[in-house]
Each structure stands twice: as structure tokens, then as C-alpha cells.
Image (spheres, rainbow, N blue to C red):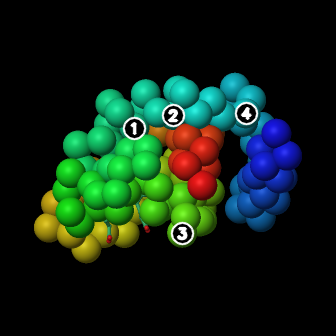
């Protein structure tokens, strides 16, 4: 719970810096279980989920390593804007535009792997 609050505080700070209109997340705190379903549907073909040590596509980091690296909140902002995360693999990561609740859920899932 404390982690979630800290995270929301970070999000709120970020929002103040970059948005002219303060945006409340639509559906409240992220739900890691929904986040898992989201990544199973859209990301698992390339990214290793859960505690997997490797990804199906070798050039893609596992979500666990993404969690360990940190900064997922900033990347999530890029998802909201439909910006493709930087990549250098041969398989180009497709562009995803996620709604605010999906993003909350995705972040909750990734942070649950820390
Ligand atoms: C077609 C394969 C593919 C799919 C599908 C895919 N990715 Fe990726 N993704 C990649 C590759 C390849 C990289 C590695 C980028 C690099 O190392 O430069 C990557 C990198 C990332 C990163 C790390 C970016 C960074 O700067 O470290 C995140 C976060 C990420 N993907 C999230 C997702 C999410 C969330 C989904 C599902 C909504 C998804 N990816 C679906 C291929 C994919």
C-alpha cells in the first residue's frame, strides 16, 4: 500500500510538471491482475513475463528486468502519448496507445515484479 501511495505521489508530481490540466487517473489505483492480462494479450509474444529469466524475443527485456531498472512511470507516459519506446532490436516494438486505466494497471503489474 505504501509503495502504491509513493508511486501515486510520483505520478501526481509528474503530471503537474507536464500537463496544463491536472489529470486524475480515471479508475483509481492500478490493478496488477488486470495489468497481467493486458501484457499477456499484447506483450508476451516478445517480453518475458513474471519471473521469467528470458524473453521469447531475445532483444526484448523481461518485464522483471524492466521493473528492476525502474523508470516505468516515465515510459508509461510515453505509452499514453502513443510514442514507441526506444528500441534497437530487429523486431520493432509496435506502437501502443493505452488508456489511463490500462497504464495504471500495467505499472502496477510491472512494479509487482520488483
Ligand atoms: C514485437 C515485439 C514486442 C512486443 C509485442 C512488445 N515489445 Fe516492448 N520491446 C520490444 C523490444 C525488442 C524492446 C527492446 C528495446 C531495446 O532494448 O532497445 C522492447 C522494450 C520495451 C520496454 C523497455 C524500454 C526501455 O527504454 O528500456 C518496455 C517498457 C516495453 N518494451 C514495454 C512493452 C509493453 C508494455 C508491451 C505490450 C503492451 C510491449 N512492450 C510489447 C519488443 C516488443
Contact (CB < 8 A) between labels 3 and 1? no
Tell me if the residue at label 4 has its CB under 8 Å from ligand 1.
Answer: no
- Quarter of the N terminus within the rendering: top right
Return the disc, 1 or 4, that comes first in the chain's sequence: 4
The residue depicted at 69 percent of the width and 26 percent of the height is 27
Quarter occupied by residue 14: bottom right
- Quarter of the C terminus within the rendering: bottom right
- How far across and how far down the image is residue 97, in percent? 42, 42
Left or right side of 60 for 68: right
Using the numbered discs, state the Cα–Cα distance from disc 2 to disc 3 in whole angstroms.
18 Å
Return the disc, 3 or 1, that comes first in the chain's sequence: 1
Q: Is residue 82 visible?
A: no
Q: Which residue is mark 1?
A: 39
Contact (CB < 8 A) between labels 2 and 1? yes
Judged from the image, the secondary structure of the residue bearing numbered disc 2 is: helix
Where 111 sits versus 27, above or below?
Answer: below
The residue depicted at 21 percent of the width and 51 percent of the height is 56
- Which-is-in-front pick, marks 4 and 3? 3
Judged from the image, the secondary structure of the residue bearing numbered disc 3 is: helix
- Residue 35's disc is 2
From the viewer's side, name the closer residue of 15 and 64. Answer: 64
Return the disc, 2 or 3, that comes first in the chain's sequence: 2
Amino acid at each position: 500500500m505504501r509503495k502504491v501511495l509513493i508511486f501515486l505521489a510520483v505520478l501526481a508530481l509528474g503530471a503537474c510538471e507536464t500537463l496544463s490540466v491536472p489529470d486524475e487517473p480515471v479508475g483509481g489505483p492500478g490493478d496488477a491482475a488486470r495489468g497481467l492480462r493486458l501484457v499477456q494479450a499484447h506483450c508476451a509474444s516478445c517480453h518475458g513475463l513474471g519471473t521469467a529469466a528470458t524473453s521469447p524475443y531475445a532483444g526484448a527485456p523481461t518485464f522483471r528486468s524492466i521493473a528492476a531498472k525502474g523508470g516505468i512511470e516515465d515510459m508509461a507516459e510515453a505509452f499514453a502519448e502513443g510514442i514507441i519506446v526506444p528500441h534497437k532490436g530487429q523486431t520493432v516494438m509496435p506502437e501502443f496507445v493505452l488508456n489511463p486505466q490500462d497504464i495504471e494497471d500495467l505499472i502496477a503489474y510491472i512494479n509487482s515484479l520488483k
